[in-house]
Image: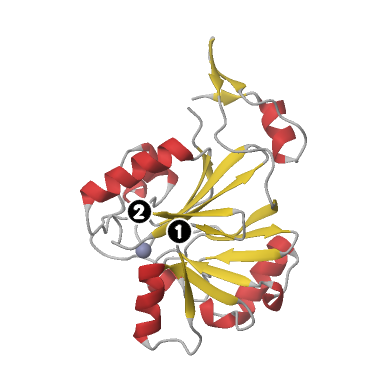
Amino acid sequence: MSKIDRRKFVYSAAGLSVMSPFILTSGKQSKEIKLKGKKSSPVKHWDIITIGNLSRNRYWGESDEKPLRSAICSCTVISGDNFHLLVDPSLKDPNQMATELDRRTGLSIDEIDSVFITHQHDDHLFGLKHFEKARWYAGTEVAAALNKSGKFEKQVESLEKTFLGAFDIIPMPGHTEDSVGLRFDFNGYSVVITGDAVATKDYWDNGQMYYNVISKEESKKTHSLIRSIADIIVPGHDNYFLNLE
Ligand SMILES: [Zn+2]
């Protein structure tokens, strides 16, 4: 198990200066880590609002066959000088969504100005309707499908390459054909929100695709892409974790 040069990591997480690259030590060996992100970024702060979980988890000895509990997706808020973007609104109950948002960011529902949906599975948009004042966004195909579904009165706007001068919009096919993730820079780290392109840290560590994928081939390619661009991964159904190599 690797041990990070803790002081440097904690300093960087606290927004203080960190030299990039830095040193990762494992036993007597040490390795230079080159972070993939930029120091300067419009992103001032980001938080996980709900840490996701799966409905069944093979790494807890559970079968992939049937659900054992309801799934909650990982929901994230990223803030800059003129935006509060929420990714994958996870909670059906409006009071619960408002409570978690306040507990993790101090923001109210109406202060969220933009919501992004990574893909059209219900557990990633259970809470979308609570964010009436925000503009709703998704990748082109997801936006078109959600608008066609007639589930929502408000239009979902489509995003293609970049957003707010802070985010790269990245196609992540595999789990679904039209899944799209977000990448942004924060204190030198490249942070990638993957939706269900990555299920949990255990799935990632074991090179395992989500139990439910449209294409294993595409999913594998997406994993390689994420590995090459991310220092920090926010998966679809777990806490965030590091990808430092
Ligand atoms: Zn999904």
Whole-percent x, y for residue 103 in the image: 71, 65
Residue that mark 1 sits on: 53
Q: Measured along the vertical axis of the image, is residue 132 above or below residue 175? A: below
Q: Is residue 48 visible?
A: yes
Q: Viewer-proximal residue, 15 or 72?
A: 15
Which kind of residue does numbered mark 2 sit on? Answer: Asn
- Identify the residue at horizontal 26%, vertical 59% (top origin): 212
- Identify the residue at horizontal 65%, vertical 73% (top origin): 113
Q: Measured along the vertical axis of the image, is residue 173 above or below residue 242? A: below
At mark 1, the secondary structure is loop
- Identify the residue at horizontal 46%, vertical 73% (top origin): 125
Q: Give the number of callouts.
A: 2
Q: Viewer-proximal residue, 239 or 170?
A: 170
Which kind of residue does numbered mark 1 sit on? Answer: Asn
Q: Viewer-proximal residue, 154 or 27?
A: 154
- Identify the residue at horizontal 42%, vertical 70% (top origin): 123
Q: Is residue 236 visible?
A: no
Q: Measured along the vertical axis of the image, is residue 86 above or below residue 42? A: below
Residue 136 left/right relative to 227: right
How is the rendered protein coloured? secondary structure
Q: Viewer-proximal residue, 82 or 23?
A: 82
Residues at discs 2 and 1 in contact (Cβ within 8 Å):
yes
Question: Quadrant of residue 121 in the image?
Answer: bottom left
Residue 106 left/right relative to 123: right
Residue that mark 2 sits on: 57
Q: Which mark is residue 18?
A: none
Q: Residues within 10 Å of mark 2 (few under 14, many from 20)?
A: some
Whole-percent x, y for residue 170 in the image: 43, 53
Q: Measured along the vertical axis of the image, is residue 187 above or below residue 128? A: above
Query: For ligand 1, which image quadrant applies?
Result: bottom left
Residue 156 left/right relative to 164: left
